[in-house]
Structure formats: structure tokens, C-alpha cells
């Protein structure tokens, strides 16, 4: 039964029962690849099938992308911005449909699906403004009659590898910025959510075509890691921007480095909130709750660890447990539900194993986990968000488990809390809940949080596109989205111009014949 109107949504987005997955923006390319099904974790149904990219069609894509780059890089950046403005409008028109498809294919709530598309629209707006602000510096030359400045040129082909949990937004963070920078993009979406990518490619290809632009500016290739590898090993792709697990990032980073290419890595997080004795507990509980159970714990910025001052530990534990008791788990398209499914049964297995393992290490379940069965849960992907009292050194606490498992830990001094907070291999997002200015500033200082994102009185998830997004340590070090992240998508050139009648050498070196 099609209660939520998925069929009409798919039709409007151009997603069919059988889809070709390889595109340069014109006719979609037939390949010798297999047709692979995309299943919805919401109800277990096959949404559609998609044909994987093969070596030959990959070559055609790269050729078209290289040709398109020759034209696109010479289009003035503000004119490139105008195209992105139109893409933003096309996304506004498709917001409800695309948000619903994201929700159905990935399993996040419809509200979060809409939020993901809104993020795409926001980055389009950001990129349009940026297209007039790709600034370089002017320096004072040490030589008389000389001028020195730097300019930023397009880099070339940008390979984008994305994860299942933000199946469309992360691509847009990369592609909209890369496009105003004059690059062309080749996107390999997650094999777990390829149809959302097909829908996006239909939307943007139409805009490029309507503007008389060549094929090859927006390209799509689909398949698993083997299709990703075609790009990571390919010298013709100077930048690989890869989002996903730390395990993937370690492989991709090495492959790209072996050919001295550039990589921008956005990898796993293990995000903590410190709740001090000076916290506004209403805000702390709400921030921790959404951070831990939103997207069923499948955000790179999901809250996984709460480090709580001993004096408020029991209160926080009780209030959170009571809030967990009120969570409604079910179909994410139904707006009365708070928590949807995990992406697939492998993710459910990982979640169950993590709970068993942390219990074996000494963890104590405060709110027990488990898999839900019965009407509405037929896909087998719905699990109960759980809370476990744990210690920082436990192996499971040190790892990112991509599921709604929240670890509670107790501290006595802020130094101890910060050490515990930073004592994990990942460094993506972090937060402190406090009304005490000294505590907040200590957390944000050089001796405080070691993460790429550090918040005060806000949870760890839900970043805005205006800031640079990314993290340190095993999170990979890359920065995407706002601020000056655009620099990763361009090549910098330093220019020195001599307008004098002499040829003085730098550093006063004499070389006369
Ligand atoms: P994953 O690592 O399994 O896959 C991510 C992408 O990498 C997929 O497209 C996959 O096909 C591709 N891939 C995997 N191995 C590859 C290889 N050897 N060569 C080339 N491509 C390869 O991750 P996932 O399960 O889809 O996503 C969840 C993970 O992503 C979590 O760890 C989460 O924290 C992380 N994530 C990080 C950010 C961030 O910005 N830091 C954002 C979203 C998700």
C-alpha cells in the first residue's frame, strides 16, 4: 500500500523500476554492469534497480568531463554562480519529493529529509555569493618595480565519493562549491542510496542543458568501492573528496597519496558532550537526546558519549531515560514517529554486536536495546535507542558504532572531562553544556576540545553550511562547505610581475656577467 505517495514521488523525480546509473548529463549510458536493487529500510521493498558503471563507461565519463572542463573553467565565476542559482531554484521546486525519497531510501525522518534538501538549497545560495568572492591576496614585493599577488584557478575533475547517511547533501556541499570554482564533478554515491543520486542528476542535468552548457560538468557513476577505486587510482582526477568510514578513508587516502593527488577526507566521528554542574539541564537533555537518537544515531555528528559531572550524573541519567521511554519508533515518513530504521540488516547486526561487546567489557544497560518486530517493523531494521553506562577506555567506547547507542560516563574535574573527551581516535564534533563562562572558554581554548567542531549549549549534530565542516585525527582533517573551504577545490598560483627596467633578484643575490 502506497500510503505516503512514494510512487508519484519517484515518477516526478524520474526514478524508474530499472535505471541506468551512468550519466554525463545527456543520454544515460548503458553499461555491461549488473542491475542492483536499492531496498528501502522503511518497509524492505525494492525501490528500483540500477545498473552499475563499468570500466568502459567510466572512461567515457572521464573523457566527457575533461572536455567539459575546457569550457567550464573559462566561464566567468559569477556566470557559473548564475547556473548554481538556477540549480538552487530547481531544488526548491523538488524539495518535498527529494526529501521524501531521501527519507524512504535512507530511513531518516521526512523532516530530516526536507532538512537535507534545505541544506542543498542553502549551499547553492552560499556558492552563488562565493562566485564573486574567490579572493586572492596581494603581497608587497621586496623588489622595486615589482608586483606580487596570488590567484586561484580551477583544479579540474573533482571525484566525490559519498556515504549513505547524507545521500544528497554532502554531494551538494562539494559539487556546488566545486562548480563555482570552475571544476567539473564526478559523483559516486553510496551503493546503499543510489536512487536519490539519480534524482539529483536529473535535476541538475536539466539546468545545465537549458543553459546550453556541454555534457560532462555533472557526472554520475554508480557501484560499490570498486567503482570508487577507478577514480581514486586515476591521475586524471586531481581531487578526491571522500565521505565515509575511517576504514574507507585510510584506504582512499593512501591510494590518492600514492599518485600525489589531493584528498579531502570526511570520516567517522565519536562525538561527546560534556555536561557540567553548571549546565542548563533542560537544554542539555534536549541537545543530547536529538544528538543521540536523531537519524537513528546514523549521523557522523551523532552524540555517542556523554561525560557528566558527578553532581548531576544521576539526574541526567534519570531524565534521559525517561525521555527515551517516550520515543516513538516507526516509519520515518509518518511525522508522529521520532526514530526510523537503521540502513540495513548488517547495520542491525553491528548494533547488536556492539551492545554485547560493551556489556562484556563491563558496560551496564540503563535503557536496554533490541530489535523491534511485528507490524510496521517488517524490514527488520528498526532498533531501540539504548543507553549504556561505560568507561572511556572500553574498546567499544573508543569506536564509532553507527547506531543509536549512547555511553554515559562520570567525571569530577573539568580537566578530567576534557581528557576523557579527547581520549578517542576521532575528532569531529563536540559540545559543552554550561552557563559558566570559564568552563565554556576552557573547552574552546587550545587546551580544550580537539575536534573540528566545538559547540557551547548546542548538541553535536546539526551543523550549518556557513562554517567549515570536518574534523581532526581519524576524522581525516578535511573541511567542506562554508568559510574558506572552497580553497581545497582550486589551485593557487603566485604571480610576480616586473614592471621596472631592471632585473633585481630576490634576496639581493648578485648575478652579473
Ligand atoms: P563507507 O565508508 O562504508 O562508504 C562510504 C563511501 O565510500 C561509499 O560510497 C563506498 O562505496 C565508498 N568506498 C568504500 N570503500 C572504498 C574504497 N576502498 N575506495 C573507494 N570508495 C570506497 O561509509 P558509510 O557506511 O556509507 O557511511 C557511514 C560513515 O560515514 C560513518 O563512519 C560516518 O561517520 C561517516 N560520515 C562522515 C561524514 C563527515 O563529514 N565526517 C559525513 C557523513 C558520514
Image (tube, rainbow, N blue to C red):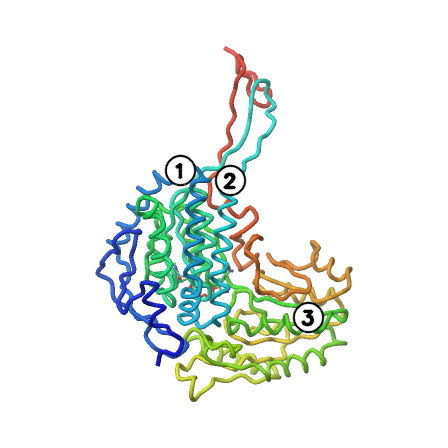
**Residue 228 disc label:** none
Sequence order check: which comes first, mark 2 or mark 3? 2
Instruction: Kindly indicate the quadrant of the structure image that contains residue 507.
Output: top right
- Give the image quadrant in which the ligand numbered 1 is located: bottom left
Number of residues whose C-alpha sits closer than 10 Å to that of mark 2, classed few (under 14), some (14–19) or many (20 or more): some
> Taking 326 as reference, is 38 above or below it?
above
Residue ID for mark 1:
75
**Residue 283 disc label:** 3
Number of residues whose C-alpha sits closer than 10 Å to that of mark 1, classed few (under 14), some (14–19) or many (20 or more): some
Image x and y of residue 302, in percent: 56, 68
> Taking 334 as reference, is 269 above or below it?
above
Per the model, the C-alpha gap separating discs 2 and 3 is 39 Å
Q: Are marks 2 and 1 in contact (CB under 8 Å)?
A: no
> Along the horizontal axis of the image, is 48 left or right of 324?
left
Q: Residue furthest bottom?
A: 374
> Along the horizontal axis of the image, is 288 left or right of 226?
right
**Residue 132 disc label:** 2
Compare residues 18 and 251 and report the one nearer the observer. 18
Image x and y of residue 20, in percent: 27, 61
Callout 1 secondary element: loop
Q: Residue furthest top?
A: 513
Give the number of callouts. Answer: 3
The quadrant in which the N terminus is found is bottom left
Callout 2 secondary element: loop
Callout 3 secondary element: helix
Amino acid at each position: 500500500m502506497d500510503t505516503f505517495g512514494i510512487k508519484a514521488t519517484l515518477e516526478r523525480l524520474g526514478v524508474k523500476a530499472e535505471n541506468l546509473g551512468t550519466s554525463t548529463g545527456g543520454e544515460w549510458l548503458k553499461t555491461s554492469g549488473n542491475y542492483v536493487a536499492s531496498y528501502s529500510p522503511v518497509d524492505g521493498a525494492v525501490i528500483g534497480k540500477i545498473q552499475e558503471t563499468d570500466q568502459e563507461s567510466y572512461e567515457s565519463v572521464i573523457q566527457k568531463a575533461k572536455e567539459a572542463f575546457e569550457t567550464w573553467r573559462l566561464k566567468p565565476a559569477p556566470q557559473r554562480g548564475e547556473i548554481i542559482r538556477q540549480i538552487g531554484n530547481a531544488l526548491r521546486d523538488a524539495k518535498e519529493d527529494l526529501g521524501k525519497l531521501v527519507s524512504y531510501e535512507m530511513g531518516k525522518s521526512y523532516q530530516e529529509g526536507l532538512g537535507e534538501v534545505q541544506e542543498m538549497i542553502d549551499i547553492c545560495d552560499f556558492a552563488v555569493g562565493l562566485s564573486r568572492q574567490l579572493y586572492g591576496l596581494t603581497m608587497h614585493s621586496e623588489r622595486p618595480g615589482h608586483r606580487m599577488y596570488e590567484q586561484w584557478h580551477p583544479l579540474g575533475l573533482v571525484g566525490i565519493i559519498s556515504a549513505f547517511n547524507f545521500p544528497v547533501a554532502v554531494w551538494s556541499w562539494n559539487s556546488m562549491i566545486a562548480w563555482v570554482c570552475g571544476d567539473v564533478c564526478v559523483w559516486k554515491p553510496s551503493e546503499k542510496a543510489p536512487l536519490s543520486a539519480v534524482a539529483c542528476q536529473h535535476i541538475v542535468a536539466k539546468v545545465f542543458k537549458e543553459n546550453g552548457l556541454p555534457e560532462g560538468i555533472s557526472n554520475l557513476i554508480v557501484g560499490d568501492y570498486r567503482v570508487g577505486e577507478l577514480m581514486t587510482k586515476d591521475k586524471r582526477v586531481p581531487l578526491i573528496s571522500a565521505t565515509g568510514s575511517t576504514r574507507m578513508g585510510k584506504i582512499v587516502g593512501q591510494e590518492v597519496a600514492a599518485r600525489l593527488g589531493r584528498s579531502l577526507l570526511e570520516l567517522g566521528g565519536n562525538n561527546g558532550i560534556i555536561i557540567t554542574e553548571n549546565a542548563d539541564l533542560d537544554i542539555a537533555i534536549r541537545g543530547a537526546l536529538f544528538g543521540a537518537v536523531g537519524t537513528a544515531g546514523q549521523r557522523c555528528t551523532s552524540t555517542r558519549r556523554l561525560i557528566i559531572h558527578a553532581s548531576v550524573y544521576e539526574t541526567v541519567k534519570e531524565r534521559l531515560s525517561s525521555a527515551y521511554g517516550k520515543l516513538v519508533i516507526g516509519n520515518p515518513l509518518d511525522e508522529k514517529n521520532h526514530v526510523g530504521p537503521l540502513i540495513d540488516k548488517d547495520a542491525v547486526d553491528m548494533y547488536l554486536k556492539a551492545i554485547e561487546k560493551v556489556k562484556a567489557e563491563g558496560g551496564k544497560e540503563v535503557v536496554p536495546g533490541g530489535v523491534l518486530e511485528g507490524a510496521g517493523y517488517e524490514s527488520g531494521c528498526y532498533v531501540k535507542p539504548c543507553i549504556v553506562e561505560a568507561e572511556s577506555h572500553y574498546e567499544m567506547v573508543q569506536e564509532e558504532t553507527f547506531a543509536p547507542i549512547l555511553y554515559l560516563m562520570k567525571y569530577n574535574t573539568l580537566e578530567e572531562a576534557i581528557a576523557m573527551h579527547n581520549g578517542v581516535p576521532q575528532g569531529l564534533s563536540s559540545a559543552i553544556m554550561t552557563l559558566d563562562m570559564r568552563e565554556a572558554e576552557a573547552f574552546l581554548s587550545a587546551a580544550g576540545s580537539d575536534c573540528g567542531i566545538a559547540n557551547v549549549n548546542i548538541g553535536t549534530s546539526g551543523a550549518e553550511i556557513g562554517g567549515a565542516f570536518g574534523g581532526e585525527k581519524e576524522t581525516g582533517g578535511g573541511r567542506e562547505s562554508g568559510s574558506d573551504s572552497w580553497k581545497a577545490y582550486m589551485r593557487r598560483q603566485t604571480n610576480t610581475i616586473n614592471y621596472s627596467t631592471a632585473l633585481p633578484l630576490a634576496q639581493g643575490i648578485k648575478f652579473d656577467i
